[in-house]
Image: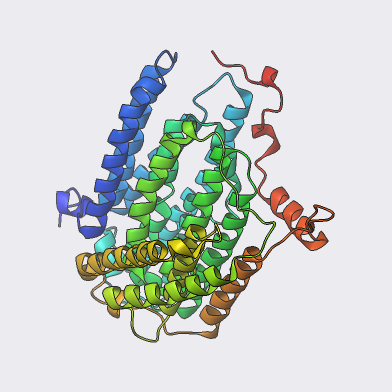
């Protein structure tokens, strides 16, 4: 074909259509919100131009079929994002946030450029669909797969590439909404688009799983110890992106795509409504869970997991058992939250809510399975991995951590937590800090008109 034939540059399938729909919808909502939010801002017009460029570049990434178009749109997206983070140009903390984001994202762009170059070297093609449909077992493709994973990590900010995202809270709220609901999902899209390169490589799949699992744990810990709403949401994004990596590492690609969509929509809502969040109610840790409520919640969790497995057809003994474990923990915790008042009278309501939650999640996964099944025709069904000791160990660690937090209790006499809990708290708090120069610790440091 000719180099400039449109079909060689643009390719729209279910994956790209879903991503374009989510990004466009979120973009419209953020634009409507920004119209009043930035009223009177001296860079009002520049902001909307940059937002249009950012959304257009993300959409271009979603439908790019030529490596040059993909890399070019990736560069434009990241440069524009870093400039939008530093929107308040007279505020030194905001400028440094944008600078650190740009450095991180340039690193990711270099990984992507390396991967695309290696793919061209191995296949002689610049067309993405030709590359991923070619039998690939050479060393350049192996290196390219590793570079793709690194590029996705720098974009989606799992641990240890998380610090730029935590430091970006100086950005205006609409920028944060676009970034967390759209741009960081680019890492997941990249992994899904190039899934045939590494889906049959057990080592790489396990690596993605480990990175995602560790990020999920760290992000969840970081979230609950923050006292700033935007930093709390940033840590939540790290945890959610980690879970997306977990799903990809398990080979449950369609579930990962569904997770990207719902996370994007929900996180956009949370950021745009963050101005109304004056205080988050924390879990009361001065007593153990009410015993009848605990047993009833365990039962609810088991029932909800069975409902999810039946509706989503996750009934085989494969790596999807990790997803079932997460559903059980989530449903049990939801039920416990409803019954936290030590009243068993709300048990029927807890049963209905937890079961409905699992049923809706199962329907969502099943719908995406049917919708996206043609995306990876050369792989095994959803490329789900076989159960390995790594997956079972991770599930046990997740359950143990959850139980530990559930039964964490401070001494009523001294009003202090155990020493080990305080030590862990300090370590987690230190590891979740942004770059020092992005912190404004004195009102005189905020110079913006």
Color encoding of the figure:
rainbow
Q: Is residue 150 visible?
A: no
Tell me: 394 left or right of 258.
right
Nearest to the observer: residue 290 or residue 334 = 290
The relative height of residue 220 versus residue 403 in the rendered view (above or below) is above
Q: Residue at x 79, y 59 (%)?
A: 411
Tell me: 388 left or right of 68.
right
Q: Is residue 298 visible?
A: yes
Tell me: 316 left or right of 291.
left
Nearest to the observer: residue 49 or residue 7 = 49
**Where residue 169 sits: x, y (%)?**
55, 36
Q: Quadrant of the N terminus?
A: bottom left
Q: Residue at x 66, y 66 (%)?
A: 407
Nearest to the observer: residue 115 or residue 58 = 58
Q: Residue at x 33, y 49 (%)?
A: 70
**Where residue 206 sits: x, y (%)?**
50, 75
Report the number of numbered marks: 0
Residue 194: name its quadrant: bottom left
Q: Quadrant of the C terminus?
A: top right
The relative height of residue 289 versus residue 73 in the rendered view (above or below) is below
Q: Residue at x 38, y 61 (%)?
A: 349
**Where residue 87 sits: x, y (%)?**
49, 25
Task: Return the residue found at the far right.
Answer: 414
């Amino acid at each position: 074909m000719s180099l400039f034939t449109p079909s060689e540059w643009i390719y729209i399938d279910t994956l790209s259509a879903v991503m374009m729909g989510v990004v466009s919808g979120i973009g419209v909502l953020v634009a409507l919100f920004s119209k009043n939010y930035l009223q009177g801002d001296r860079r009002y017009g520049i902001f909307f131009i940059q937002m249009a460029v950012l959304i257009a570049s993300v959409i271009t990434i979603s439908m790019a079929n030529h490596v040059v178009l993909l890399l070019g749109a990736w560069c434009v997206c990241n440069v524009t994002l870093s400039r939008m983070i530093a929107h308040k140009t007279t505020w030194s903390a905001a400028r440094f946030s944008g600078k650190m984001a740009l450095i991180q994202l340039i690193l990711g762009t270099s990984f992507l450029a390396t991967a695309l170059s290696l793919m061209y070297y191995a296949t002689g093609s610049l067309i993405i669909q030709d590359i991923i449909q070619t039998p690939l077992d050479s060393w350049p493709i192996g290196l390219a797969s590793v570079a793709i994973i690194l590029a996705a990590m720098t974009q989606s900010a799992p641990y240890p590439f998380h610090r730029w995202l935590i430091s970006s809270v100086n950005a205006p709220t609409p920028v944060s909404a676009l970034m967390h609901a759209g741009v960081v999902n680019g890492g997941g899209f990249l992994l899904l688009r190039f899934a045939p390169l590494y889906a049959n490589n057990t080592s790489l799949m396990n690596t993605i799983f480990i990175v995602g699992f560790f990020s999920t744990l760290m992000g969840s810990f970081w979230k609950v110890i923050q006292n700033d709403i935007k930093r709390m949401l940033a840590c939540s994004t790290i945890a959610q992106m980690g879970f997306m990596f977990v799903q990809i590492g398990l080979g449950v690609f369609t579930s990962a795509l569904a997770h990207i969509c719902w996370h994007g929509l929900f996180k956009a809502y949370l950021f745009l409504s963050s101005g109304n969040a004056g205080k988050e109610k924390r879990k009361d840790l001065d007593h153990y869970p009410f015993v009848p409520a605990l047993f009833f919640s365990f039962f609810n969790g088991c029932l909800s997991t069975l409902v999810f497995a039946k509706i989503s057809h996750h009934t085989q003994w494969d790596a999807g058992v990790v997803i079932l474990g997460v559903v059980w923990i989530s449903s049990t915790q939801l039920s416990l939250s409803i019954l936290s008042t030590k009243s068993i009278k709300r048990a029927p309501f807890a049963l209905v809510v937890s079961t409905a939650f699992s049923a809706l999640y199962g329907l969502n996964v099943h719908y995406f399975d049917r919708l996206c099944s043609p995306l990876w025709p050369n792989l095994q069904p959803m490329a789900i991995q076989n159960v390995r000791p790594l997956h079972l160990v991770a599930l046990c660690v997740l359950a143990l951590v959850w139980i530990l937090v559930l039964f964490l209790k401070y001494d009523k006499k001294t009003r202090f937590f155990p020493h080990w809990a305080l030590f862990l708290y300090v370590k987690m708090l230190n590891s979740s800090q942004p770059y020092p120069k992005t912190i404004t610790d004195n009102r005189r440091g905020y110079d913006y008109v």
